Amino acid sequence: MHGILIASFPLKEVLAVVAAICGSIVALLGFIKWWLPWRKKEEVKINTIQEMRSIQRIYEYMSDQLDDTVAERVIIFAGHDSGKIPKAGSPYYMSSVYWKVCHKKLSKEEALEANYSAGIDIADYREIPVDGHYIGMLLHIYEHGDILIKTEELPECQLKSYYTTELVTESLVIYLGFVDCNFLYQSIATFDEGGFSAGDLTKIRLKAVAISHELGI
């Protein structure tokens, strides 16, 4: 006959082991409770810094578009319907996101006076309902990539009134892509009567591609 050996442990030792295990579990839960919010804060910090660096690079590319060409005004716009998908029967809006302006043929004082006289502040381009011609332009750049616009050749429309007020003679409008429901595009304009050269347009388009990459498009 074979007997079965059953090891018995003193109750005191069993309780000590259980207490140790429970203590470890409590410590682990405490660590997780501390670590999860810390990790979330770290992710927010890392993502915020990454996005800030992308914004900085976007401004650098916009500066290149101004410095390397006859462009004098660069704006990134968002076409939107208050964060929703556009729907017939409701307005469609455009808002300026980032911009840089440089009146190359005017002194700083003359440039300020020109903007003041025209009543232009690009920051005012916020939640502006657009007309049919403007929407047609956005559809065109979505299908073809960009459009070169001469102010004097525009029909009477919302865009012509803005360009005339801003003293824009020619503008290249470039499709950048979508971020959520926002239709992002860039308007690069000159006040020079001679307009853009072929070389200017190539340089501007190349920097626009780099901007799209920074936007994650």
Image: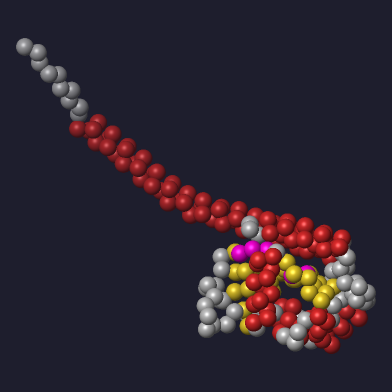
Q: Is residue 2 above or below residue 23?
A: above
Q: How is the image coloured?
A: secondary structure
Residue 41, given in percent of the width and then of the height, sits at 54, 55
Judging depth in this view, the residue of 53 and 89 nearest the camera is 89
Instruction: Report the predominant secondary structure element of the magenta stretch.
Output: strand
What residue is drawn where x is 63% and y is 57%?
A: 216
Residue 199 is at least partly visible in this image = yes
Quadrant location of residue 92?
A: bottom right
Image location (x, y in percent) of residue 145: 70, 64
Q: Which residues are magenta?
A: 172-178
Q: Residue at x 24, y 36 (%)?
A: 15
Determine whether, in the image, residue 57 is placed left or right of residue 191: left
Task: Look at the image and tell me in which quarter the C terminus lies.
Answer: bottom right
Q: Is residue 190 left or right of residue 98?
A: right
Q: In the rendered view, would you say 90 is above or below 72?
A: below
Q: Quadrant of residue 128?
A: bottom right
- Pinpoint residue 12: horizontal percent, then vertical percent: 22, 33
Residue farthest to the left?
Answer: 1
The answer to which of 108 and 85 lies nearer the viewer is 85
Residue 12 vs 44, above or below: the answer is: above
Depth check: 11 or 133 in front? Answer: 133
Residue for point 90% across, 74% down:
192
Above or below, 78 relative to 10: below
Q: Is residue 72 left or right of residue 85?
A: right
Q: Position of residue 109 (x, y in %)?
A: 91, 80
Q: Quadrant of residue 176?
A: bottom right
Q: Residue at x 83, y 82 (%)?
A: 152
Q: Is residue 102 visible?
A: no
